[in-house]
Image (cartoon, rainbow, N blue to C red):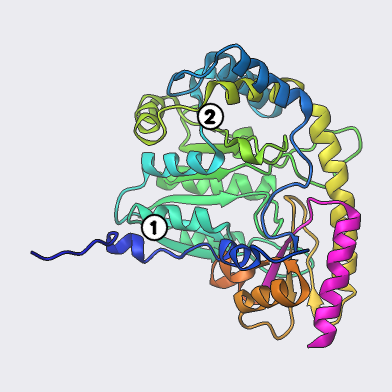
Amino acid sequence: MLLNPTARPLVQSLGASRIREVANAGIGLPDVLPFWFGEPDEVTPEFIRNAAKEALDGGDTFYTPNLGISPLREAIAQYVSALHRPVDVNRVGVTSSGVSALMLVAQLIVNPGDRVVAVTPLWPNLLEIPKILGAQVVQVPLQFGQTWELDVQQLLDALTPDTRAVFLNSPNNPTGWVITREQQEIILAHCRRHGIWILADDVYERLVYDVQPGTASCAPSFLDLATPDDRIVSTNSFSKSWLMTGWRLGWIVAPQPLMSDLGKLIEYNTSCAPGFVQRAGIVAVERGNEIIAHTVERYQAARDFLYERLNALPGVTSPKPKGAMYCFFRVAGAEDTLALCKQLVVEAKLGLAPGSAFGPEGEGYVRWCFASSLERLDEGVQRLTQFLRSR
């Protein structure tokens, strides 16, 4: 009998998260400043935590509907409708995290052997998800400059008629690139013409900077342009806008014909999101505008501080991010950023993410999450400065 207790070859071929690899190298080391994950240094606001506590105290520990409890779906529909075009509650599905939403959407529309296009550098989870399903992923790189920018014609050339879907994350992790309304209109017209699905990862849509005073901060979204029947799916999360990374709660806005099948997939993946977590989600979307305003103001100050400090360092060049919560900067002479970031952890006690984690286009760059206090960022820059001088 032939024994071969291993995963299927496709899974074995997936790239492990190099962000986690660096973080694991720092476990057990004292005084490491961790800026490797996309996570704020503030806890979830008390009124959100209290909503979950009250739900738990009330016995909300049972299964919930696959697509989420009605009050949360309705709250999300109202929230999305206020930011974009009106969205019917029957097009909203609640998921156990934003990354689960991305996997579910991919399972909904991507077949083995399908051609999928992704704009990169890109969060590694989003690059690997279609590969898990046996799809071929074609990468279209953003252009490095004073800011990260998209060559729209290069993307259109890649979106051939045999393409099944395009994965777009804007504001982008790791670069902070933000797509423009004009670019969205061009891409949407092209995808409508060829029947290509648009999978929009909108998790950072509220984290945009340099907006006009008195206007709500929100990045351009395909939901602003989409009709209910367009092949557009938006995924989102409570993690970034409401400081809820550990809660693992997200949502999907999709065309109505997908929703019954989405419910099936949720059943076979996680069954449902916890009820007490969903109760916290309700108060977040209904009462969380002040949190978002506070977070955007805080992050913009952090971005400006880190951008200026990084570009003052010899051999470091950082474009100015327009959104999200990261500086993705080039380090002269860095040919192996995984090794560089491991070295930074051990020698400088500084935890950053290697650019190679975000695809081959990211090699030579390093990601720094600036969702932190200016004091911690300043200490981190001092450690990086000393490390670079020692080299």
Question: Above or below — where is 93 with respect to 158?
Answer: above
Q: Mark 2 Cα within 10 Å, few/some/many (few <14, many 20+)?
A: some
Residue visible at 87% across and 51% down in the picture: 373
Whether residue 378 is visible, yes or no, is yes
Residue visible at 38% across and 36% down in the picture: 269
Secondary-structure class at tag 1: helix
Residue visible at 20% across and 64% down in the picture: 4
List the residue tagged with mark 1.
131
Quarter in which the C terminus is drawn: bottom right
Question: Above or below — where is 57 with respect to 329?
Answer: above
Instruction: Point out the tag, 1 or 2, that comes first from the N-terminus.
Output: 1
Q: What residue type is labelled 2?
A: Thr
Question: Above or below — where is 239 with respect to 34?
Answer: above
Q: Nearer the viewer, residue 229 or 255?
A: 255
Part of the protein shown in magenta: 365-391
Q: Which of 209 and 334 is in front in this view?
A: 334
Whether residue 86 is visible, yes or no, is no
> Which image quarter: residue 81?
top right
List the residue tagged with mark 2.
227
Residue visible at 70% across and 71% down in the picture: 345
Is residue 156 part of the magenta span, yes or no? no
